[in-house]
Amino acid sequence: MKKRRQMLAGLLGLAGFSKAAEAAREDNGALRARVIFVQQDNVLSFPPTGDGVRVGTVTGAISGTSITNFQFLPVPPPEFRADDLCAISDVDGDQILFRAQVVGRFLEPFGEPSRPSGIVFGLGGPFSGTYEVIRATGKYGYLVGRKFPCKGLGSNPAKGNLLGTVYVEVYSDQFGNRPI
């Protein structure tokens, strides 16, 4: 029954029948949104000012390369907040610029402290927020103004004074009649 509700909600949402899709939501009110793209970046720069650069790739309904200028905002730990600009370019030369606003929490260093070099995970944590399209070209032009929920994880190694990686999933529960 649960699968049927999810399928019905998804189909109605894709068809643009948002009210009918609401009725097909699971009993707890959650509509399972689908991942429209996954972003996987390497951190290239992370100065003490909290502004830095990540580069990587995105795969999914939108695929291509990503460049993110990130800015951490001052808040008391263990919470963190960031206000980022993320540009994605695809193989057709079409581009999207997102404003990504996220809130997360830092995790404790993780590993096996009784072993030499046993701490593996140094700094990072899970986050969630939104990706808002603020500029777009070509086939993505119709997305300007849309906000998409996201969740992700940033992680940095404890060893070697190295920078880390960021993994983000961006979701949408409806696309209208146009491809995303």
Image (cartoon, grey):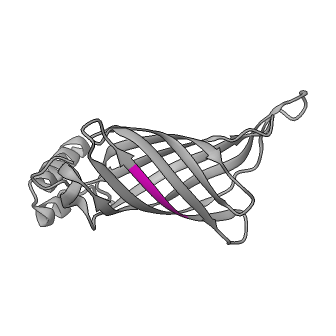
User: Looking at the rendering, in which quadrant would you find the N terminus?
Assistant: top left
In the rendered structure, the answer to whether residue 157 lies left or right of residue 12 reads right
Q: Quadrant of residue 47?
A: bottom right
Q: Is residue 102 above or below residue 4?
A: below
Camera-nearest residue between 11 and 149: 149
Q: Position of residue 156 (x, y in %)?
A: 69, 42
In the rendered structure, the answer to whether residue 110 lies left or right of residue 7 reads right
Residue 86 colored in magenta in the image? yes
Q: Quadrant of residue 89?
A: top left
Q: Quadrant of residue 173?
A: bottom left
Residue in the image at 86% along x and 30% along y: 117
Q: Position of residue 97 (x, y in %)?
A: 37, 57
Q: Is residue 171 above or below residue 92?
A: below
Camera-nearest residue between 28 and 121: 121
- What's drawn in magenta, residue-wise? 83-87
Q: Which residue in the rendered view is the most extreme toward the top?
A: 115
In the rendered structure, the answer to whether residue 162 lies left or right of residue 68 reads right
In the rendered structure, the answer to whether residue 101 lies left or right of residue 149 reads right
Q: Is residue 160 above or below residue 39?
A: above
Q: Position of residue 108 (x, y in %)?
A: 75, 50
| Prevailing secondary structure class for the magenta stretch in the rendered image | strand
Residue 117 colored in magenta in the image? no
Residue in the image at 27% along x and 42% along y: 93
Camera-nearest residue between 98 and 130: 98
